[in-house]
Image (tube, rainbow, N blue to C red):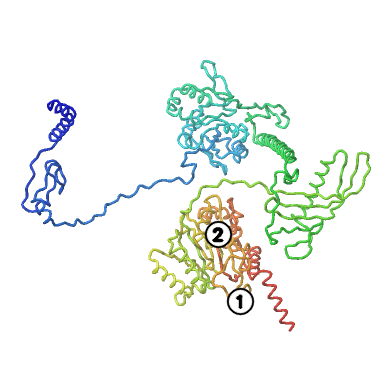
Amino acid sequence: MRFSAFISVLRSVGPVVIGISLGFTLSLLSVNWSEEACYLDGKQSEDVTLGQDGLLKGARKPNSISTLNDVESEEDFEPRIVPYKQVQQSAPKKVFRARYISTELGMRERLFVGVLTSKNTINTMGIAVNRTISHHLDSVIFFTGMRNRKVPHGMFVVSHGDERLIWNMFQTIRYILDHYINEYDWFYFVQDDTYTEADRIKALVDHLSMDRELYMGSPEEFIGGEMEGKYCYGGFGYVVSRTLLLRLQPFLENCRNDILSARPDEWLGRCIIDYTNTNCVSEYEGLQYHHYELGKNSDPSKEQSEHFKNALTVHPVSDPEQMYRLHRYFTEIELQKIYDEIAKLQAEIKNVSVVAFEGNRSAQWPVGINPPFEPKTRFEVLKWEYFTEEEIYSCIDGSPKCELHGIDRMDVADVIDTAVGELNKKYKPVLHLKKQQLINGYRRFDPIRGMEYTLDLQLEVVNQKGHSRSITKRVHLVRPLSQIEIIPMPYVTEATRVHIIIPLTLQDRNYVDHFLEVFASNAFETSENAILTFLFIYDPVEAQQVNQNDIFASVKTQINAYERKYPTVKIPWISVKTETPSQIKFMDIISKKHPVDTLFFLASVNTNINSEFLNRCRMNSINNWQVFFPIHFQDYNPDVAYHNQPHPATIDLVKDAGHFDRRSFEESCFYNSDYMATRTRMVADVQENEEILETMDIYDMFVKYSGLHVFRAVEPALHQQYRYQACNPRLSEDIYHRCVQSNLEGLGSRSQLAMLLFEQEQGNST
């Protein structure tokens, strides 16, 4: 009985015992047996590095068991301080971030246009093509064999140095693959004897998918008919996708060596067909490449076929005059389409507004024009001007009434004619209206929508039977603001160094201290990328006494003091001797001492210059494109603006403190290369009359002799203290008059001057 009970217990416990025994056995087999090194003192044990098993210093082996000796050694253990060594971090890798989001995302422009021209036709047909398409398309480049000596202005020309047609086509494709293949999705090639309706080409590629291998134009059979497939005839132009050019790129050299052809368009077609198996097509996914072949001595205005009106390209064009006639014809067609679309949209808006909550009142008048300006306070209410056909009752000089003349008279006459014409359109053929006189006229300028007019017209109405009578009709008109156009400008950065030129005369010495104090805080302490240069102007008498009595000695001392205060700053100065100070004569000297890519800022000593303006000087001055003449804010005479009041320490840009001096042209930003090019153009006139250099300033020089944009704008960051200018009577009459007017307008506002006159009259009366 006991034995059976033992057997039953063993059966239940036996597997557990066997499992535990097997676990101990396997664990003992996996232990790494090795002898431990014994050391008599703890100091030696500190120096243990790596044992046979690669164990770290001071670490106990897994199979070791602590003993009494180990406890004693731990009690005698002395800690050792390991000095902290900073980890030498490598210089972080500079991450390149694109300036534009489109560059970082890999977005490309839509259409590239390459015009195939020649040395003999670039100055005739090439110019005609450029004038008809360049302002519609973003990128137009002309490819030619030999370069003409005189390259037309405003055209980007690439010459390959050879007149062979096939070679030029090969070089053109290779040039595009090297420079533009990653910037555009579609490439349009056209000859200079072909007229292109630019907007239609843009609309065509806008509806094409960029990943298609497409070769689109006017399909033609190969000469001889031996080769299968069709190429695009170059006379009507053709469109090639970027994907197709990339696929063709590895085989371009083979095409040059293996394919013999007399025509460049046929050579390119054979190359595309041989290596990409892509034929020319005139239709793709419902889009048609319409073209029209123009007959000899044909007049575009007499062509009435729909095929001609829908053409993207017209070929051949015999001369530039015919090119311009074609452009006018197609422009009129597109303009009429726009007018028809506007009328259709206006009619739809009127139909929809009927079912609105407010009915027809919900639609703004005129349809499509912004609603009128709504003033928030009584100070924002727009002022109406009353006028007749002869007079206007709001004058610039504050007079109650003055004669209507110049552009204002033309404006009133045009508005009346337009009003009568629109009335006749509305009532013809039942009635015919003729203007008798303008009874009342009102106009105001709305900054949101344009000039608004209200006219009370006395009209003679004649019906179909010839009976007439006189009526009075009130009409409302709006002359809307023209559409704002974004003009493409060359790329500029704010990293350009600005060379600030400050001319100084004897009368300017008192302003140098304040100028240097302000400039140091705005430029020297902020490490602004600018160089300050003083131009000391001596008259002949002052120049002879410079060793005994230098009139600018105190200024030079101040310059040395600031150079010691700011060791990294150098303030150069230049001395000149002249009897008649002239901006052009000064800049002739300064221009020769600086590189051609120098950006100049010519300023006066009483101007406060800061970083904000210097950045705008950099952005608004574009080499070989634009010069910048800012309009500074000038303080009024403090004795007038703050009469019987304490003068403030700082002056804000408010209307009672000063004004933007539109009469002053002394500040300017321009590149040295632009100055030198403009100065060269006036050499012939200077030889005939040397006084031009003394009677003309830099602004007039750029306006008259340069082909650059002369940009003029108010500049709130350019602040100038009040100063009475000494006007030079030897300058031109216009410049002298501007100087006098600037002095008069800079005294104070009309209300401030009126208060002074009022106080003076009150004092005289008592």
For this orientation, the residue located farthest to the front is 1
The residue to which callout 2 is attached is: 668
- Residue 645 is marked as 1
Q: Is residue 370 above or below residue 721?
A: above
Q: Earlier in the sequence, mark 1 or mark 2?
A: 1
Under mark 1, the amino acid is Gln
Under mark 2, the amino acid is Ser
Q: How crowded is mark 2: few (under 14 residues within 10 Å), some or many (20 or more)?
A: many
- Please state which of residues 678 and 680 is positioned toward the viewer in this rendering: 678
Q: Residue 200 at x, y = what percent? A: 62, 33
Q: Residues within 10 Å of mark 1 (few under 14, many from 20)?
A: few
Locate the C terminus and report the quarter of the image it occupies.
Answer: bottom right
Q: Residue 87 at x, y = what percent? A: 26, 52
Q: Residue 715 at x, y = what percent? A: 57, 60
- Please state which of residues 496 and 302 is positioned toward the viewer in this rendering: 496
Tell me the quarter of the picture where residue 310 sits.
top right
Q: In this view, does 588 lie above or below 457?
A: below
What residue do we see at 40% from left, 68% from top? 563
